């Protein structure tokens, strides 16, 4: 189940838009835990908060910084806190992660080891920082759009109040991921700020922060932040409530107040409006997810690129990068496998160098022996043209990354045939089109591709990843 579904289930089950921060902040720890050793006291407090609120909230939000500040015992406390959260309630790790270089490994740790459901990220390192977190289809990210810190105003409101930077962050980050995977974190006491964000992001989940600072304007916050269905907004339980011994009663009554206001607001605004998503789900390509991820990890680049033939193309595909991203690599292998399962062959052959990792992965998955034709034959040693063992007369399926003119794959197939092997089928991830499959057919090869270049550009354009200019540059090429 993905984050979005898990969150919606949790909202329904507990009839609540409230979430709770699980922060071991020594300054906020109630006096009744002070007789304990610090970590033990904090642990008891956090366990108390979870036990008191599990029936009244839709999500928990531990702030990583508070745990880190306590050193190794703090990280141990984080593990214990995560383990105490009921499995059906989503966990949003408040990390405000902001470092491009550590994003891939950090995403892996938080999503696969710590098993949190979502994470908060800072937007300033851009889409390439966020992409490694989005390759986990079950997980989600919340992009920090604005904070209520007065000192941040000079940046957030820049350059003008009419067109502030924080709204640009909303517009830009909306193009990075689907509404199911990318929400917005908005810290503000100002309902107008929330309304401006809601107006340009009607489809996004907004996680509100700092709304209690001035108090008294809950109705305005809900009016501004709820979507047309009366949801899409997560409300924090006020931090100073978390020390109270009657916590469950207080959270229950806050939930009732919010639900009452929500009902009134829905009733007042009952119109029938339709939201049109950025991504068109009609005619969605079956490999849409894979296409977006290939783009997000920079395997698909738009610009002006000279090909081996001297021709200039408006794009370049670099599938060699896939090996550095196991999630995407796995999906790529599955896509090849879907084609290979319908073909007959004794061995697999990869075309060097780009396709050797793919052929190796497929050989392991399919338990099928692999060989490859060398690109250049060494003048020493065994001087083999084909690496690996085989028997002449066997049938080999050739695996390659992309067909442009078909030259390299036909050269490789020719070497295999010279050694007495039969090559009938060639399987690639991407077909550049423009007659290359016919050319292979004329040379006696059936070719199969997971994707065509026009399917890729159509999908990227529909999803807002490339603009009209890039799309048209491709169409006119
Ligand atoms: O965008 C591209 C274009 C080409 N390649 C490399 O070239 C061959 C395919 O070219 P042919 O003209 O069909 O021989 C492909 O195997 C890549 O190595 C590329 O990676 N990306």
Image (cartoon, rainbow, N blue to C red):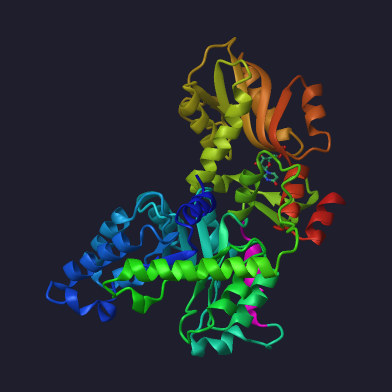
Q: Which residues fall within the magenta stretch? A: 164-177
In front: 280, or 190?
A: 190
In front: 143, or 217?
A: 217
Q: Is residue 36 above or below residue 340?
A: below
x 29%, y 75%: residue: 244
Let me know if residue 33 appears in the view.
yes
Residue 375: x, y in percent? 59, 34
- The quadrant of the picture showing ligand 1 is top right
x 78%, y 30%: residue: 437
Determine the image quadrant of residue 413.
top right
x 61%, y 69%: residue: 264
Residue 322: x, y in percent? 55, 45
> Is 166 contained in the magenta span?
yes
User: Taken as a whole, is the magenta stretch helix, strand or loop?
Assistant: helix
Q: Is residue 306 above or below residue 190?
A: above
Let me know if residue 64 appears in the view.
no
> Is 190 contained in the magenta span?
no
């Amino acid at each position: 189940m993905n984050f979005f579904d898990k969150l919606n289930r949790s909202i329904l089950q507990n009839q609540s838009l409230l979430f709770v921060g699980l922060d071991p902040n020594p300054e906020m720890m109630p006096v009744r835990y002070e007789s304990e050793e610090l970590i033990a006291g904090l642990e008891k407090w956090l366990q108390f908060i979870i036990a008191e609120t599990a029936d009244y909230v839709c999500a928990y939000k531990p702030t990583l910084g508070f745990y880190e500040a306590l050193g190794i015992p703090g990280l141990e406390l984080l593990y214990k806190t995560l383990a105490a959260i009921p499995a059906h309630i989503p966990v949003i790790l408040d990390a405000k992660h902001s470092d491009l270089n550590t994003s891939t490994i950090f995403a892996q740790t938080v999503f696969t080891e710590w098993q949190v459901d979502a994470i908060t990220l800072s937007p300033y390192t851009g889409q390439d920082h966020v992409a490694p977190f989005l390759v986990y289809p079950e997980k989600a990210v919340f992009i920090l759009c604005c904070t209520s810190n007065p000192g941040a105003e000079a940046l957030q409101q820049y350059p003008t109040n009419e067109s502030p930077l924080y709204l640009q962050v909303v517009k830009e980050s909306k193009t990075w991921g689907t509404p199911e995977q990318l929400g917005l974190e908005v810290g503000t006491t100002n309902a107008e700020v929330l309304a401006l964000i809601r107006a340009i992001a009607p489809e996004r989940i907004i996680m509100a922060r700092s709304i209690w600072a001035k108090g008294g304007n809950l109705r305005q916050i809900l009016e501004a932040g709820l979507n047309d269905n009366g949801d899409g907004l997560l409300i924090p339980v006020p931090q100073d409530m978390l020390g109270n011994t009657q916590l469950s009663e207080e959270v229950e009554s806050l939930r009732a107040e919010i639900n009452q206001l929500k009902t009134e607001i829905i009733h007042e605004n009952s119109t029938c409006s339709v939201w049109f998503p950025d991504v068109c789900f009609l005619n969605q390509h079956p490999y849409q997810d894979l296409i977006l991820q290939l783009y997000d990890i920079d395997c698909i680049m738009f610009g002006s690129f000279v090909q081996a033939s001297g021709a200039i193309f408006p794009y370049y595909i670099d599938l060699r990068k896939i090996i550095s991203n196991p999630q995407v690599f796995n999906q790529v292998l599955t896509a090849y496998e879907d084609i290979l399962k319908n073909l007959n062959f004794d061995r697999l052959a990869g075309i060097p160098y780009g396709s050797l990792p793919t052929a190796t992965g497929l050989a392991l998955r399919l338990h099928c022996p692999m060989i490859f034709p060398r690109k250049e034959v060494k003048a020493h040693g065994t001087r083999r043209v084909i690496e690996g063992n085989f028997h002449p007369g066997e049938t080999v399926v050739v695996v390659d990354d992309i067909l442009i003119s078909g030259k390299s794959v036909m050269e490789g197939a020719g070497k295999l045939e010279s050694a007495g092997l039969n090559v009938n089928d060639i399987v690639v991830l991407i077909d550049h089109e423009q007659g290359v499959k016919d050319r292979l057919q004329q040379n006696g090869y059936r070719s199969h591709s997971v994707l065509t270049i026009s399917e890729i550009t159509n999908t990227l354009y529909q999803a807002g990843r490339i603009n009209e200019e890039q799309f048209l540059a491709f169409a006119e090429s």
